[in-house]
Image (cartoon, rainbow, N blue to C red):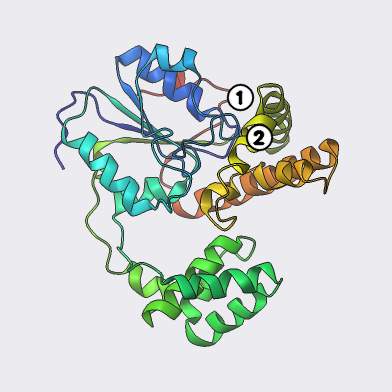
């Protein structure tokens, strides 16, 4: 796709709490550009605090697109995100700074995507029942027997990916890896954009994650979770699984103290950041890697 904006788009990936949003905002502000969300959690309108969506102050500094534009009851997908983004790419309002922690969004943007048919409700219900019953090993056993190629590539610490691979196999009779061979053309050529991964030192990132969750609580995260519960949505929906939400829900239901819920949320977030780093290393090795806590990308890179 030909972009009309004069400056090439910038793609900024990185684990949660690594400073992606602030870098994107500074860059958009400097160049008169627009920040575009590439985070699967920040699309939902029901979560602002827990997903660290841009504040009113941030929105006043530069335009932001694809944040909070999806209802919580929606099963949003990378394909839906690409369709939304394609409308922006058709007439970019300025330099696009596309940022988020959902690596699949960003790689699909530059590498293409396979459109897999929708998963029938009954298959999703079966997979969820197995996961809820602590029987995820049965999903893995089925994949090992029937789709060994996908099984061997899976992140075993990520139940969402395991569930997705099993559902695709059951629904279509084809393995997820086989489907990926039918990818559609990318919306942006990798050579036509600047691609950056923020990679702060792990112990410092872990400290940032803990401090940020404390700020979320101070900013009203519990009230946000209370409001979410009034929507009475299916707990299996992606919006119900955003980091911190299940733990704070457990606290509000009397199943954990606030201290216990906070500790659990911080641990889960650190584990998620670790999985993100592994994914980026495996899929984004040719991107520009920067430690934002020791160097300023705006001064150290030509972007």
Coordinates of residue 207 in the picture (x, y in percent): 73, 31
Give the structural element (helix, strand or loop) at label 2.
loop
* 239 with respect to 90 (left or right): right
What is the quadrant of residue 168 in the picture? bottom left
Q: Which residue is drawn at the image coordinates 83% and 45% (left, top)?
A: 256
**In this view, which residue lies farthest toward the bottom?**
145
Circle count: 2
What is the quadrant of residue 126 in the picture? bottom right
Question: Which residue, given by chain and number where applicable, does mark 2 sit on?
Answer: 201
Compare marks 1 and 2 and give the one earlier in the sequence. 2
Q: Determine crowd level at label 2: few under 14, some 14-19, many 20+ residues with C-alpha closer than 10 A.
A: few
Q: Which residue is drawn at the image coordinates 57% and 52% (left, top)?
A: 278
Q: Determine crowd level at label 1: few under 14, some 14-19, many 20+ residues with C-alpha closer than 10 A.
A: some
Coordinates of residue 249 in the picture (x, y in percent): 71, 44
* 10 with respect to 40 (left or right): left
Question: Which residue, given by chain and number where applicable, does mark 1 sit on?
Answer: 293
What is the quadrant of residue 176 in the picture? bottom left
Q: Nearer the viewer, residue 214 or 46?
A: 46
The answer to whether the residue labelled 1 contacts the one labelled 2, judged by CB atoms less than 8 Å apart, is yes
Q: Which residue is drawn at the image coordinates 37% and 78% (left, top)?
A: 172
Q: CA distance from mark 1 to mark 2?
A: 8 Å
Query: Is residue 27 something that shows in the picture?
Result: yes
Query: Is residue 284 something that shows in the picture?
Result: no
Coordinates of residue 11 in the picture (x, y in percent): 37, 35
Coordinates of residue 185 in the picture (x, y in percent): 22, 55
Seen in the picture, residue 50 relative to 29 is either above or below; the reply is: below
Quarter of the image where the N terminus is located: top left
């Amino acid at each position: 796709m030909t972009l009309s904006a004069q400056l090439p788009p910038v793609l900024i990936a990185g684990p949660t709490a690594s400073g992606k949003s602030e870098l994107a905002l500074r860059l958009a502000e400097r160049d008169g550009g627009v920040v575009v969300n590439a985070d699967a959690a920040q699309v939902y309108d029901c979560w602002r605090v827990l997903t660290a969506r841009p504040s009113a102050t941030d929105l006043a500094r530069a335009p932001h697109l694809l944040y909070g534009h999806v209802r919580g009851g929606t099963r949003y997908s990378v394909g839906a995100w690409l369709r939304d983004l394609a409308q922006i790419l058709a007439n970019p309002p300025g330099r696009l700074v596309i940022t988020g922690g959902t690596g699949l969004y960003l790689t699909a943007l530059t590498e293409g995507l396979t459109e897999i048919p929708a998963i029938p409700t009954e298959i999703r219900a079966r997979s969820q029942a197995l996961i809820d019953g602590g029987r995820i090993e049965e999903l893995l056993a089925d994949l090992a027997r029937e789709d060994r190629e996908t099984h061997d590539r899976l992140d075993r610490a990520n139940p969402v990916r395991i569930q997705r691979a099993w559902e695709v196999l059951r629904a279509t009779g084809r393995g997820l890896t086989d489907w990926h061979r039918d990818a559609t053309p990318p919306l942006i050529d990798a050579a036509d954009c600047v691609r950056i991964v923020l990679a702060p030192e792990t112990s410092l990132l872990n400290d940032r994650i803990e401090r940020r969750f404390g700020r979320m609580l101070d900013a009203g995260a519990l009230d946000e979770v209370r409001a979410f519960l009034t929507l009475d949505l299916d707990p299996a929906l992606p919006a119900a699984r955003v980091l911190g939400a299940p733990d704070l829900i457990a606290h509000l239901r009397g199943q954990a103290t606030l201290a216990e819920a906070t500790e659990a949320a911080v641990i889960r977030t650190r584990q998620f950041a670790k999985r993100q780093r592994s994914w980026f290393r495996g899929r984004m090795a040719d991107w520009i890697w920067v430690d934002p806590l020791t160097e300023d990308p705006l001064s150290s890179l030509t972007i």
